[in-house]
Image (cartoon, rainbow, N blue to C red):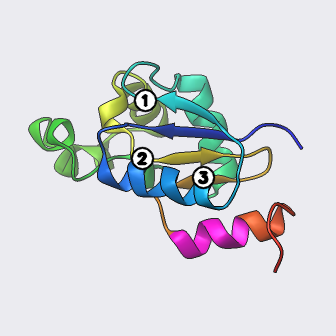
C-alpha cells in the first residue's frame, strides 16, 4: 500500500482528535502541516476528483479567513478553477484534516467514515 498523508493544522482540536484516532488505531501516516505546506492547486484538483464531493466541501467555512473574505456569498459565482486557485492561496481556507490515501480522500474528521475507510483498505479488521 502506498503511503497515507494526514494533512492537518496542529493547533486545531479536530485535527488533534483525528491524529489521536490514527495513532490509537496503529495507522502509519506522513503528517503535513497545512499552514506551513499549503496544498497546491494541482493537488487540490486531484483530491477533489478522487473525493467525489462538491468543491465547496473543501472550504473551511468556519474559518476566520473564509468569513473575512465573505466567501459564503462569493463561491457560487466563482468557477471551479477560480475556487481551486483560491484554496491554493492559503491552507487556512481548506477544511481539515485531510486524509489522503491512494484511493480515497476524506475531508474533515468523521470517525465512522475513517473507520470504514480503514476496513476497506485492509488496515483494520471488520
Is residue 76 placed above or below 94 in the rendered structure? below
Residue range in magenta is 111-117
Q: What residue is at 43 percent from the left and 25 percent from the top?
A: 88
According to the picture, the residue beneath numbered tag 2 turns out to be 96
> Looking at the rendered structure, which numbered label has been put on residue 23?
3
Mark 3, secondary structure of its residue: helix
Please report whichever mark, 3 or 2, sits nearer to the chain's N-terminal start: 3
> Looking at the rendered structure, which numbered label has been put on residue 118?
none
Camera-nearest residue between 103 and 22: 22
According to the picture, the residue beneath numbered tag 1 turns out to be 34
How many angstroms separate mark 3 from mark 2 (CA)?
17 Å
Q: From the viewer's perspective, tell me whether residue 81 is left or right of residue 89.
A: right
Q: What residue is at 18 percent from the left and 35 percent from the top?
A: 65
Camera-nearest residue between 27 and 35: 27
Circles 1 and 2: CB distance less than 8 Å?
A: yes
Residue 109 locus on image (x, y percent): 47, 60
Q: What residue is at 30 percent from the left and 34 percent from the top?
A: 92
Amino acid at each position: 500500500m502506498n503511503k497515507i498523508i494526514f494533512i492537518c493544522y496542529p493547533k486545531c482540536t479536530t485535527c488533534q482528535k483525528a491524529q489521536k484516532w490514527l495513532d490509537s488505531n496503529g495507522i502509519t501516516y506522513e503528517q503535513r502541516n497545512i499552514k506551513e505546506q499549503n496544498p497546491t492547486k494541482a493537488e487540490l484538483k486531484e483530491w477533489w476528483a478522487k473525493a467525489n464531493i462538491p468543491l465547496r466541501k473543501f472550504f473551511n467555512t468556519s474559518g476566520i479567513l473564509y468569513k473575512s473574505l465573505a466567501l459564503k456569498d462569493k463561491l457560487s459565482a466563482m468557477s471551479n478553477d477560480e475556487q481551486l486557485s483560491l484554496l491554493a492561496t492559503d491552507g487556512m481556507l481548506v477544511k481539515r484534516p485531510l486524509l489522503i490515501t491512494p484511493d480515497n480522500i476524506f475531508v474533515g474528521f468523521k470517525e465512522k467514515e475513517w473507520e470504514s475507510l480503514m476496513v476497506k483498505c485492509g488496515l483494520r479488521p471488520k
